[in-house]
Image: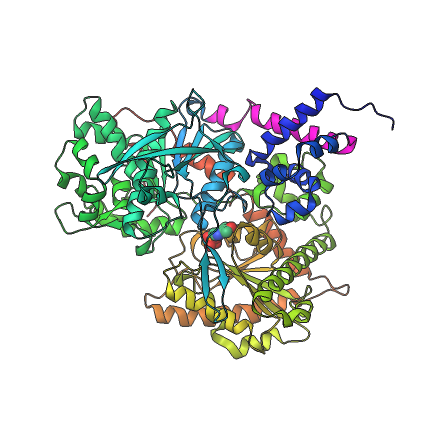
Amino acid sequence: MTHKPYAPHEIAEMVVGLHRLAQNLWWTWDQPAQELFQQLSPRGWQNLYHNAAAVLREVSDAELRARLQDRDFARHVQEVLKNFNHYLHRKDTWGTANAPHLQDRPVAYFSAEFGFHESLPIAAGGLGVLAGDHAKSASDLGLGFVGISLFYREGYFMQAINTENLQTEYYTLLDPRNLPIEPVLDPKGEPLVCTVGIGASTVAFKAWRVNVGRIPVYLLDSNLPENEQLYRDLTLHVYGGDSTTRIMQEVLLGVGGVRLLRALGVHPSVFHMNEGHAAFLTLELVREKLAEGLSFEEAFAATRQECIFTTHTPVEAGHDRFSPDLMAYALHRFFRQLRVPQAEVLALGRVDPADETEPFCMTVLALKASRAANGVSELHGQVSRHMWRRLFPDRPEAEVPIAHITNGIHLLGWMKGPVRTFWKRKLGNDWENDVNTPEFWHRVLDPEFITDEEIWALRYRLRRELVEFCRRRLLLQGERITAASYIAFDHLLNPDALTIGFARRFATYKRAPLVFQQFDRIVELVSDKHRPVQFVFAGKAHPRDDAGKRFIQHIIHLSKHSALKGHLVFIENYDIHVARQMVSGCDVWLNNPRRPLEASGTSGMKTTCHGGLNLSILDGWWREGYDGTNGFAIGEDSHPDNVEEQDESDSENLFQVLTEEVVPCFYNRSVNGIPRQWIQKIRRAMATLVPQFNTWRMVQEYAHNFYRPAAPVTEPPPGLEVVAEP
Ligand SMILES: *Cc1c(COP(=O)(O)O)cnc(C)c1O
């Protein structure tokens, strides 16, 4: 014992700091911070699914204080807290230099879902994960930014597979005390309560604040005793219930979100609608302006100057449509306050305003009420301009005002431990500073700076971690079905084999089973003793998507087929944690949607920084990313209109690329077992894709193109200047 113990106030400071840290999602993208909670309770960390707030709650105060008398641990805590404070308070950010007008009047970003981390499971899929990554990068860039969403107290469903290989759904109640969320309070310290008119009722709601680095995301919650059960349950499940629930959720999100911001004294300069779910916010902005004395036309024009819209899907069913009756029911009280005939409001959601039978489409409202709009990849921009051309009858299609900003991922949030450690060893402690830049990733092209052997060792490690993860998970999954299969799990998957991953929502257009259409040829591939191939699948089907569920059933059935057993696995309950294991461990990330229905896709971007290669249809982001050297393309930059024809040719092409390019390249080894050509592709992929397809670049594009200060109403709307490329 050579040190004098820490003074009580020093300990108290660290305890307070740790609690603040656990309540800020910054720890989810800072490795030393994560390790801190892991060290605090390794078992709790595993059992509580990497939930820092819950770990801290489980460790008693006395134990924590005792642990902090350990010098090494305390130093680690102090170092992390210093970095955390520096991150929160630094002034020299990209945002202060490039978007100073947003500091006082931020961007308000509305999204029906946000996916931040596996411990806060309130997202259904890619849209939410993108929103979460957008918020994290807005924080990193120091942008003035607030997020708005709902607090779904049972989140999105959890998936279990029953003995018939069918997906079953169950929910668990989230406990706010164990989550990185804090109640939003009024000046008296009571929960801040606002109201919104839904149907004939006044619905009260409170809010939770999620700290995402420097920025807040507010989650609205209607689960208050003063509400009828019907309304309390609006914030039960992500996209829960039928279209009546859906429209009421969307009123709460859009109208309620604006009300909350006003109650908090936040006056955004831009309202960014991430998908059409939040489009009712535009009506609330109009209502506010009417109350200030503007006419409906003036109010609508002024609202248009404040709003930005991002559309995310070319799939028809992905656009919410509500019948006129449902609109009249849900917005009954609201309509009266808008002081124009109901027909005029309903017309805002119709392609043909005169067609009184046309349902009200949230995307149409969002497009009409925004000064600028965008799709999420170049091709999706084109497809969207075509899709919505009838809204702009006096323009050629190429001038339909829907531009594009290609999606990205929040790099540090996705990068797995071994890759971070790799860069830290190469570049030292400050390696993260320019991790989003081309300069950083160009280093990978230099075989003297990073050798083939180093890259291959990293790949092996990541693949082995995935194999171990799959074995653990399958053991748990298997236990429910039969305990007898225990021994089999050791032989499941091979850490040396070419590992192909597919994990996404089981929407049918993504065609999960496509690769197995050539069943006999696949059997040949997986059972090749010298050049084995194996598959890891995961994904949820929407609870009402029976066709998607049949796809899952089919794949699980195949995974039990004697010819594929041990070479094809299906991991239950796809979420951010499963995604991280898979995108990092797989050698090849398979993406075979029916073109052009994958607006962007982002999971393939997550694989690249881990040294995985994409094998994908030239749809969404991959059409922009692929350059002939940095991965594999299935088919051409075109597609037949006929769906059966497309499925047939894609399946044929997929198999051809797999057997003639992917497998030979992976197994073409030098004398010491290194696949030099393969590694060259990894280098090219990292250098060309990572600096481009991240949200650091993406949010900067939004800031430059879309988050500019609103122009006075007399000028032409800036959205119209964003002329789409032909
Ligand atoms: C990244 C991600 C998605 C989106 O992936 P796509 O390629 O767009 O299908 C969906 N779900 C989870 C959990 C993710 O991490």
- Identify the image quadrant of residue 274: top left
- Chief secondary structure of the magenta span? helix
Is residue 631 toward the left or the right of residue 248 in the image? right
Residue 425 visible from this viewpoint: yes
* Residue 700 in picture, x, y percent from top left: 47, 35
- Identify the image quadrant of residue 597: bottom left
Is residue 691 toward the left or the right of residue 355 in the image? right
Residue 402 visible from this viewpoint: no
* Residue 289 in picture, x, y percent from top left: 23, 25
Q: Is residue 27 above or below residue 407?
A: above
Quadrant location, the N terminus:
top right
Q: Nearer the viewer, residue 605 or 327?
A: 327
Magenta highlight range: 70-98
For image coordinates 35% across by 48% down, the residue present is: 381
* Residue 327 in picture, x, y percent from top left: 21, 45
Q: Is residue 641 magenta?
A: no
Is residue 664 toward the left or the right of residue 106 in the image? right
For image coordinates 71% across by 48% down, the residue present is: 450
- Residue at the far right: name it: 2
Is residue 611 toward the left or the right of residue 628 in the image? right
- Residue at the far front: name it: 225
Q: Is residue 74 magenta?
A: yes
* Residue 304 in picture, x, y percent from top left: 27, 32
